[in-house]
Image (cartoon, helix red, strand yellow):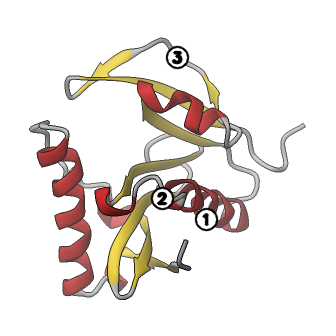
Amino acid sequence: MQDLQWNCYPFEQLSPDLLYAVLQLRSEVFVVEQNCAYQDMDDYDQAAVHLTGQLENCLVCYTRLLPPGVKYDGIAIGRVITKLSVRGDGYGKRLMQESIRYCHQHWPTASITLSAQHYLEKFYSDLGFNTVSEIYMEDGIPHIEMLLDSIGAD
């Protein structure tokens, strides 16, 4: 597995080329690959920190990190994406570990919530997340809400 170059950007610091790459990857995976028409640009991007993983200057991993109080009481990790061409190589796990590390570093007392596609429940539970909802439909795909307590929680 090659090493990824990780970077975090507030929305204002995303270059036009990087923003284009992010939106292209999100569309490639969530709209085309998953055959799901939904409103990707939902007015949360401007409040988010955008974590990118690049391999040889190509965006292959991405998450959107929302600070506490924007979507949930705690942090929200969303738009978790690994490019199809590198799936199965462990980059998705590294992406989530990097996302969690960033969240704990910048918001150590906040819990982390994510709306996970149900089939990924074990993937996220292996990272320490607990399922806190029943299965619900989001954009025609079964999801569950999952929570990771803050590092300061008892």
- Residue 38: which numbered mark, if any? none
Q: Quick one: 35 or 148, which is closer to the camera?
A: 35
Q: Is residue 61 above or below residue 138?
A: below
The quadrant in which residue 44 appears is bottom left
Residue corresponding to mark 2: 65
Tell me what residue is drawn at x 50 percent, y 47 percent.
Answer: 76
Tags 1 and 2 touching, CB below 8 Å: no
Q: Amino acid at mark 3?
A: Ser
Q: CA distance from mark 1 to mark 3?
A: 25 Å
In the image, which is nearer the foreground, mark 1 or mark 2? 1
Q: CA distance from mark 1 to mark 2?
A: 11 Å
Residue 47 percent location from the top left of the image: 38, 63
- Asked whether residue 73 appears in the rendered view, the answer is no
Residue that sits furthest to the top in the current view: 134
Can residue 28 be seen here?
A: yes
The x, y position of residue 37, in whole percent, is 9, 38
What is the tally of numbered marks visible in this picture? Answer: 3
Of labels 1 and 3, earlier in sequence is 1
Label 2: few (<14), some (14–19) or many (≥20) C-alpha neighbours in 10 Å: many
**Horizontal and vertical percent position of residue 6:** 52, 78
Q: Residue at x 36, y 69 (%)?
A: 60
The residue pinned by badge 3 equals 133
